[in-house]
Each structure stands twice: as structure tokens, then as C-alpha cells.
Image: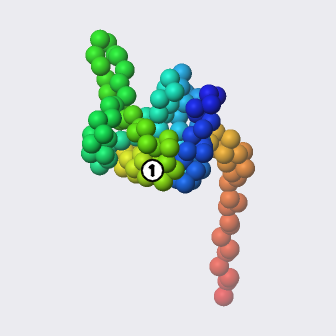
């Protein structure tokens, strides 16, 4: 894991706990089970949507794009503002915006693999209760 990715834990400390995981040659950033950002080539991209786009637009922050079949495809992640790395309150604000966009996306939160596996191994069927026979009169 790069120093840049490791530094995100401190940068977002006022947002709350984040988790980072390797994915697609970069790292995903999760908060409360929702992917709020990702890092590629030491550049942070935050989750965005129509509700948060104006904040990115004001600062001319571009979306992350990739090439597919000769076409440029934008994703719903926009480059993070530079101020975020110097000001923890600013980082918390942008982190909340990204988290809110993730909530609005309708995607369910991702469960940790270990937690999901533990649930599967400890889950048992409840015993079936037998009905008592009615007393004869």
C-alpha cells in the first residue's frame, strides 16, 4: 500500500473510520460499508452524483474516465480538491458529500468477507416447535 493511501486514514479522521482495499490496480476507500472514493496513480477520486456535482463543478474538478471500445467513459467519481489534503474539516466535508452520494446511489453496503463467512457458519435453523394436542373432554 502506498504512503498516499495510508495517509487517507489521517486525512479523513474527522469523517470517521475508513477502510482501504486494493482493487483494479488502485485502492477503494470505504466508509460505513459504502465505497466513497478510490485512488489510482496517487490521485483521489470521490463519489459524486447530481446532488453533489455543483461542488465539483465550481472547482472544475474532472470526473475519472477510462477508454472502452474507443470511447471515453466517465465514472461517478470526481477528482478531490487539493484543499482536502491540508484541512481535516474540509476533508470531512468532502467525505460526507461522497458518503451521501454513495447512499443515494442505492447500492447496498458491502459486507466484509470474514463477517459474511462467520454468519454462514454460525447460523442455525431454529428448532421446529410441535403443536400440543388439544386435551380431550
Q: Position of residue 23 (x, y in %)?
A: 55, 27
State which quadrant residue 105 falls in. Answer: top left
Name the residue located 53 percent from the left edge and 34 percent from the top edge.
28
Closer to us: 75 or 123: 75
Closer to us: 72 or 125: 72
State which quadrant residue 135 falls in. Answer: bottom right
Furthest residue toward top: 70
Name the residue located 59 percent from the left edge and 29 percent from the top edge.
22
State which quadrant residue 134 falls in. Answer: bottom right
Q: Position of residue 128 (x, y in %)?
A: 67, 61
* In the rendered image, the vertical position of residue 7 relative to residue 134, given as above or below: above
- Tell me, yes or no, if residue 70 can be seen here: yes
Screen quadrant of the N terminus: top right
* In the rendered image, the vertical position of residue 84 relative to residue 23, given as above or below: below
Q: Is residue 77 left or right of residue 126?
A: left
Name the residue located 34 percent from the left edge and 16 percent from the top edge.
68
Q: Position of residue 70 (x, y in %)?
A: 29, 11
Disc 1 packing (10 Å; few <14; some 14–19; many ≥20): some
**Residue matched to label 1:** 90
Q: Position of residue 109 (x, y in %)?
A: 50, 46
Closer to us: 6 or 106: 6
Amino acid at each position: 500500500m502506498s504512503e498516499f493511501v495510508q495517509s487517507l486514514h489521517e486525512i479523513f479522521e474527522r469523517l470517521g473510520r475508513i477502510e482501504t482495499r486494493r482493487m483494479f490496480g488502485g485502492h477503494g476507500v470505504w466508509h460505513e460499508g459504502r465505497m466513497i472514493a478510490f485512488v489510482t496513480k496517487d490521485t483521489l477520486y470521490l463519489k459524486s452524483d447530481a446532488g453533489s456535482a455543483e461542488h465539483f463543478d465550481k472547482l472544475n474538478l474532472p470526473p475519472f474516465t477510462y477508454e472502452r471500445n474507443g470511447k471515453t467513459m466517465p465514472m461517478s467519481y470526481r477528482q478531490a480538491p487539493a484543499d482536502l489534503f491540508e484541512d481535516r474539516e474540509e476533508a470531512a466535508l468532502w467525505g460526507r458529500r461522497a458518503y451521501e452520494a454513495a447512499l443515494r446511489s442505492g447500492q447496498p453496503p458491502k459486507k466484509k468477507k470474514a463477517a459474511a463467512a462467520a454468519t454462514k457458519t454460525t447460523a442455525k435453523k431454529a428448532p421446529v416447535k410441535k403443536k400440543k394436542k388439544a386435551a380431550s373432554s
